[in-house]
């Protein structure tokens, strides 16, 4: 078994804990956001129903005069730039989630990891114990010196 020298929890686990905490906080806000969006959608629907006919004619005219090749080229350039920005934001978000996860998990888990690591170290010590037991058995199995017999004394006749 390999020795574990770090007691630190891997960053992806902290990121997962941070993401879970962030999701929980956002879900708590959901009822209020849902009510607000519902109200905004209802008011916007009334406005757009009134303007739908004129807007359709305006968009039809725009579509006939648009240079789609130029739009495609601009879109490709913009997509590359946005992909780079998105990558930087993802790294930043990941780092923030790791930090948040470390706060959520706290030091209690690190202390528990220390206990587990010490338990692992004590279970890896049986080799030393087995060597000591083998040495003790070897000492027991070694031939013991025999006791010397007492010299015989002549018996006297009575």
Image (cartoon, rainbow, N blue to C red):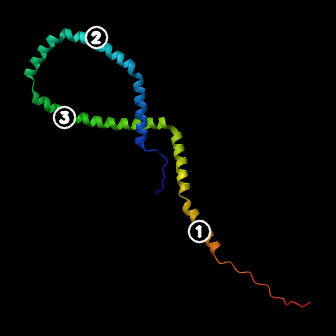
Residue placed at 56% from the left, 55% from the top? Answer: 122
Q: CA distance from mark 1 to mark 3?
A: 75 Å
Q: Provide the residue designation for mark 3.
A: 77
Q: Identify the mark nearer the N-term, 1 or 2.
A: 2
Which label belongs to residue 43? 2
Q: Where's residue 90, x and y in %?
A: 33, 36
Of badges 2 and 3, the one in the foreground is 2
Q: Is residue 106 above or below residue 50?
A: below
Q: CA distance from mark 1 to mark 2?
A: 86 Å
Judging depth in this view, the residue of 112 and 123 nearest the camera is: 123
Q: Identify the mark nearer the N-term, 1 or 3.
A: 3
Residue placed at 62% from the left, 70% from the top? Answer: 137
Q: Are marks 1 and 3 in contact (CB under 8 Å)?
A: no
Q: What SS does tag 3 mark?
A: helix
Question: Crowding at label 3, few (<14), some or many (≥20) Cα neighbours within 10 Å?
Answer: few
Q: Where's residue 148, x and y in %?
A: 75, 83
On the picture, is 14 further left or further right than 119?
Answer: left
Quadrant assignment, res 145: bottom right
Q: What SS does tag 2 mark?
A: helix
Q: CA distance from mark 2 to mark 3?
A: 36 Å
* Residue lying at the far left of the rendered structure: 64
Question: Crowding at label 1, few (<14), some or many (≥20) Cα neighbours within 10 Å?
Answer: few
Q: Provide the residue designation for mark 1.
A: 134
Judging depth in this view, the residue of 71 and 40 nearest the camera is: 40
On the picture, is 41 further left or further right than 60?
Answer: right
């Amino acid at each position: 078994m390999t020795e574990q020298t770090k007691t630190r929890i891997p960053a992806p686990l902290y990121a997962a804990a941070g993401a879970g905490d962030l999701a929980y906080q956002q879900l708590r806000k959901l009822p209020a956001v849902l009510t607000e969006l519902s109200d905004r959608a209802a008011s916007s629907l009334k406005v757009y129903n009134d303007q739908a006919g004129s807007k359709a004619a305006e968009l039809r005219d725009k579509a006939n005069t648009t240079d789609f090749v130029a739009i495609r080229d601009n879109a490709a350039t913009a997509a590359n730039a946005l992909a780079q920005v998105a990558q930087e934001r993802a790294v930043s978000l990941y780092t923030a989630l790791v930090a948040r996860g470390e706060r959520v998990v706290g030091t209690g888990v690190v202390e528990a990891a220390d206990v587990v690591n010490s338990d692992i170290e004590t279970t890896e010590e049986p080799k030393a114990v087995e060597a000591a037991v083998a040495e003790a058995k070897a000492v027991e199995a070694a031939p013991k010196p025999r006791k010397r017999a007492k010299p015989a004394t002549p018996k006297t006749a009575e």
